[in-house]
Image (tube, rainbow, N blue to C red):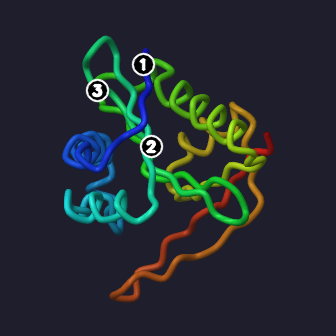
Amino acid sequence: MKIKFANVSDAPLIHDLMIQAFMEYKDENPPSSALEETVQLISNALENGEEALIGFDKSEPVGMVRFRVKDEGLYFYRLSVIPEKQGQGIAKKILKSLEDYATKIGVTTILCKVRMTVPKNIKLYSSIGYSLYDEEVVHKPNGINIKVVSMKKLL
């Protein structure tokens, strides 16, 4: 598996991978806001400090993760693996590359937020050394509340 840093020109590919992966959450209440993101929003984010890694199986793009380096560490989000490739360790490989990058640039903490309604993701991150350190309720428009946990890994 090859993992490369994304360019702004990769925004359509990043969007496509994300939409494929997040479609499983379309019936959640509320659906993931990832499904509302556009190529233009991703492109703008990449132009303004967001970074991304894209994973390829041979030459086929199969997954990606978006991230930003902040004061408290490297914060990742929208980790996506296309449905037909899930369960094959691709997410773990992408996260390992992210951890290697963080170490290379001197960042010692990786952080993420996970919906409590998606225990498989909490289990995935826990299995590779992430621990829960906070719980909160995110208040969305229309009075919708989403329970999330914050997780982190010290490198």
> Taking 96 as reference, is 58 left or right?
left
User: What crowding class fits label 3: few (fewer than 14 Cα within 10 Å), some (14-19), or many (20 or more)?
Assistant: some
Q: Which residue is mark 3?
A: 61
Identify the residue at horizontal 34%, vertical 16% (top origin): 57
> Taking 40 as reference, is 58 left or right?
right
Q: CA distance from mark 1 to mark 2?
A: 14 Å
Identify the residue at horizontal 29%, vertical 65% (top origin): 44
Q: Which residue is mark 2?
A: 65
Label number found at residue 16? none
Marks 1 and 3: CB-CB under 8 Å? no
Q: CA distance from mark 1 to mark 3?
A: 9 Å
User: Label 1's element?
Assistant: strand
Marks 3 and 2: CB-CB under 8 Å? no
> Taking 32 as reference, is 114 left or right?
right
Q: Position of residue 135 (x, y in %)?
A: 69, 68
Residue 146 drawn above or below residue 23: below
Looking at the rendered image, the disc whose residue lies closer to the viewer, 1 or 3, is 1
Q: Position of residue 93 (x, y in %)?
A: 54, 24
Q: Which residue is mark 1?
A: 2
Kind of residue at disc 1: Lys
Camera-nearest residue between 93 and 27: 93
Identify the residue at horizontal 75%, vertical 50% (top origin): 109
Q: Classify the position of the C terminus by image quarter.
A: top right
Give residue 148's quadrant in the image: bottom right
Camera-nearest residue between 95 and 131: 95
Q: Position of residue 81 (x, y in %)?
A: 37, 33
Kind of residue at disc 2: Val
Marks 1 and 2: CB-CB under 8 Å? no
